[in-house]
Structures are given as C-alpha cells and as structure tokens.
Image: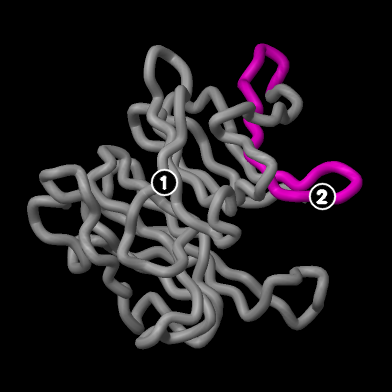
Amino acid sequence: MVALVCLSPDGNSIFLTRAAGPAPKLNLYRCNRTARGWSRPQQLGPPLSSPSWEVTSSIAANNSIYFGSKRKYGKIRIWFAPFVDNTWTRADRITLNHPHGGDPGIAPDESFMVFTSIDLPGGYGHRDIYLTLRLPDGTWSKPRNLGPRINTAYIEHGPRISPDKKYLFFNRSNGWDLRIDSVESDIYWVELKEYLPESYR
C-alpha cells in the first residue's frame, strides 16, 4: 500500500508513506529520479524511521521534513527533521497545545503549517484541518480550526501548501476504505489569503 506522496523541492525525489512486511506498518520511503525513471522505494533510516508508525510527510524548501509519527507517545504527533549538511541528523517533536495532531503540510518557508486533528471539541467532523503559525521565538501559535468552508462532517485530510503559499490543497472523504464502492474521496483547493495574517502571505 502506498499513500500520501510528496515531491522534493528540486523535483528529484518522491517521498511516500508505504506499508510493507508480514505485519505491515507504515513508514517513510524515498524514490530518486534516475536517467531511466524513478528508483525503487527505499526506506528512510533513522531519524526518519523508528519501530513505530511514520505516517505522513511534507517538505520545506530547505528540505527539512515534517511528518506524523506514533513514536514515544503511542498517538500520532507531529515531528520534524531539519536538513543539515546534506542529511537529516535528528527528529524533534513539535509542541502544539493539542492532544492529537498529524498529517502536516508545511509552508515552503516554514512560516506556518496546516495539519489534521480528530474528534476535538468545536470541530465539524471526524477529522478537521487546523492552522498554526511559527512565532518570532520559534514556537508555534495555538492551532486554529479553519472553519466550515473547509471542514465538514466528512473526513478532511492530506493538507498541502502550494510553493507560492497562495493555495491550500486537501482531500475530503466519506470513509477510509476506498475498496468499498460507497467510499469516495475528492481533492479540493482554496485561496489561503483570508486565513493568514498579511505578514505570513
């Protein structure tokens, strides 16, 4: 099973979530562009892999990776791996005032992030999309639900930011198992300017 694919900023790598093995769990993989097409998926090693589930990823313009993981906490939290000296040297958890967060979509300049969270008070459905801003001190603002124009009683997931920071793309589904005929998933997009302070646009 392959899901949640994203392209590196230079267009030479595809990062994806993949389940493999006799007792499959999700992990992060990369395919590199070659003269003959794309290489076979190679699992990313530590710090981007762990004995737990690594479930989604998005990549900033500087190649830092933001991803969801169940490591240490048993529930999905958002982590990021900074890209230093042409590699990912460590993974740090992003502290949000939120009991559950995953599926991060990072702005190219890392100035803000969208993510999904489930079953929170004041939400619109099972899974909603939230926004958090990076503050001048490097911490993240209190997450804000993006409201009923984006979030519905259905499942909103897979939020991603366009390279120019102008648009949000996301999926809306009425279920998770696409093998069931009644389950449908569609891609939506909205302009972000009305959801962001002017200095973040």
User: Which stretch appears magenta?
Assistant: 18-37
Which of discs 2 and 1 lies nearer the camera? The answer is 1
Vertical placement of residue 164 versus 141, above or below: above
Q: Main secondary structure of the magenta part?
A: strand
- Give the residue pinned by disc 1: 93
Q: Is residue 54 magenta?
A: no
Residue drawn at 36 percent across, 49 percent down: 94
Amino acid tagged 1: Arg
Q: Amino acid at mark 2?
A: Pro
The picture places residue 112, in percent across and down from the top left corner, at: 26, 51
Residue 17, given in percent of the width and then of the height, sits at 65, 45
30 part of magenta stretch = yes
Left or right: 107, with 47 as reference point: left
* Residue for badge 2: 24
- Whether pointer 2 and pointer 1 mark residues with C-beta atoms closer than 8 Å, the reply is no
Quarter holding residue 92: top left
